[in-house]
Image: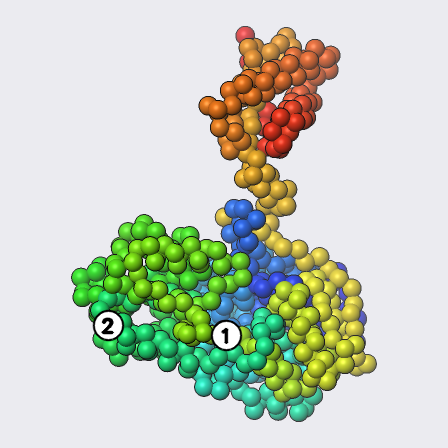
Amino acid sequence: MNNINNRAETLVVALGGLGEVGKNMYAIMHDNEIIIIDSGVMFPKDELMGIDYVIPDFNFLKKNEEKIKGLFITHGHEDHIGSIAFLLSTVEIPVIYAPNQACGLIKRKLVDRNISYDNLKVYTEDTVVKTKYFTVEFFATTHSIPDSHGIIINTPNGKIVETGDFKFDLTPIGPMSNIHKMAEVGKNGVKLLMSESTNALSPGFSASESKVEEELQEIFQRNTKGRIIVATFASNVYRLKHIVETCKKYNRKIALFGRSMVNNIEISIEGGYIKDENSFVSPEIANTLPPEEVCLLCTGSQGEPLAALSRIAKGTHKQIKLRPTDTVVFSSNPIPGNNASVSKTINQLYLQGANVFVNNIENEIHTSGHGNQEELKLMIRLFKPEYFMPIHGEYRMLKKHRDLAVDCDVPIENTFILGNGDILSLTKDGVKRKGHIEAEDIYVDGNRIGETGNIVIKDRKIMANDGILVAICNINMNEHKLLGRANITTRGFILVNENEELLRQIEEVATNTVIKELNRKNVNYNDLKGQIIAELLSFVYEKTGRRPIILPVILDVKK
């Protein structure tokens, strides 16, 4: 793997973020230098039972560790910074460059995991970082978190632009995208544009954050008798900033619920994005104030079972009990896959008598931080790339984004829809595909990284669907004798009280199998366990149509 390029070519290695929404990570390599863009995490789908995070495969970086010159972060969202702590535990990273808000979030993550790292540098739009082969520059973008940037990498084989996450909002709450710098870079020539594809399936332009501001103002103005509970993404700092300012305008104090919400508010106050510290009170104080003077700002907009709003909706939150006069505002849209859990939370809120607002045509109380199709086209037009590579999206999003690039006069043969592990080669003559490396999903299960593989996940699925059956056998191996009968215990397989006859039959099969095996001359533990599993699995499937995990427990009892 150390010899995948020669000195004349620049390589783009996709380590994460393709064919998926999350764990964004790309490496740019020329000769003996590598720079890394982002190090994100992906949150597991339901079928990944017990998995906390999915992170990129760092093996390529570990094998080329001595070439790494730095990690560059586009912005502070989890899908771009969430795996940094795991990366630092595996690979030596000489320096990390990140914008101000992202730096604050990264520092907290490292403290939480007891990782000491002292070369985290803040960059601005004016920062220029030079290595032997690369010159790295930045341009401001509008996104749902402050200090979002795209990255310009000047290489010996032309400019590469990686957009980070962006939208074009002409009336944003925060700073506007630096359209002038983008156009200037495009005027001077861009070899390869790597552009995010999250909303490539959404036509037109995304709604402006200022429109959301107006709608939220109206809700606060109309609902004056009870508490207002707002659930939104904790990382959407400009939304939080507006909510804080609106609460001040309508004389409401704010109580925070959810660790990520508290962390983001604290970092935003430290960074100067949110200025009114006096608006915040503790949950205990909030419970003593008149309801019309209180706003509860909480996590749980995606229906996460353990998040604050979900526990409030179920009535299990220790500090907050829902009241019939409460107004609940979902200032978010369900992420694909979360619709059912969000609907469940909304129904629970209605059952308790709350007044609920969700984002729809009547109430535009959320807008995406990602650009729709017309904004993606504008990005392509500004940079006018020779070659185009859609990133950050499921395959259907990448394909649609490629089609948009073709509509914007990029020749289809100059576009590349890649998967994780694929490599692009840039030379003076052009850009082409070049090989593939292993870039599998790595599972984080508690403190274990990469130890929980597909076999473990498969076993967990079986246990979840078909349960577990344990056969306990007391044996005197010296005499090759079963002491008593096999004892059968199950969990999640059948209801014991209603299936006594089936359990008796399973016990009989296990007992007869053990006796038969012990009559053989050279029997050993492994052969005995294997035969018990085979016989019981066949019998149980014939009787029930289910395939539980069969766990034989052999106890060698000496008389």
Instruction: Give how far across and how far down residue 240 sits, in percent.
Output: 37, 72
101 to 312, vertically: above or below: below
Residue 369: mark: 1
Amino acid carrying mark 2 in the image: Thr
Instruction: Give how far across and how far down residue 368 sits, in percent.
Output: 49, 73
Mark 2: which secondary structure? loop
Residue 294: mark: none
Q: How is the image coloured?
A: rainbow
Image side of residue 280 versus residue 437, left or right = left
Query: For the point 52% across and 29% down, which residue is it?
Result: 494
Q: Quadrant of residue 233?
A: bottom left
The residue pinned by badge 2 equals 224
Query: For the point 34% across and 58% down, which residue is it?
Result: 350
Query: For the point 57% across and 63% down, which residue is it?
Result: 22
Instruction: Give how far across and how far down residue 329 sits, in percent.
Output: 36, 67
Of the numbered discs 1 and 2, the one sitting upstream in the chain is 2
Query: For the point 54% across and 54% down, which residue is it?
Result: 44
Amino acid carrying mark 1 in the image: Gly
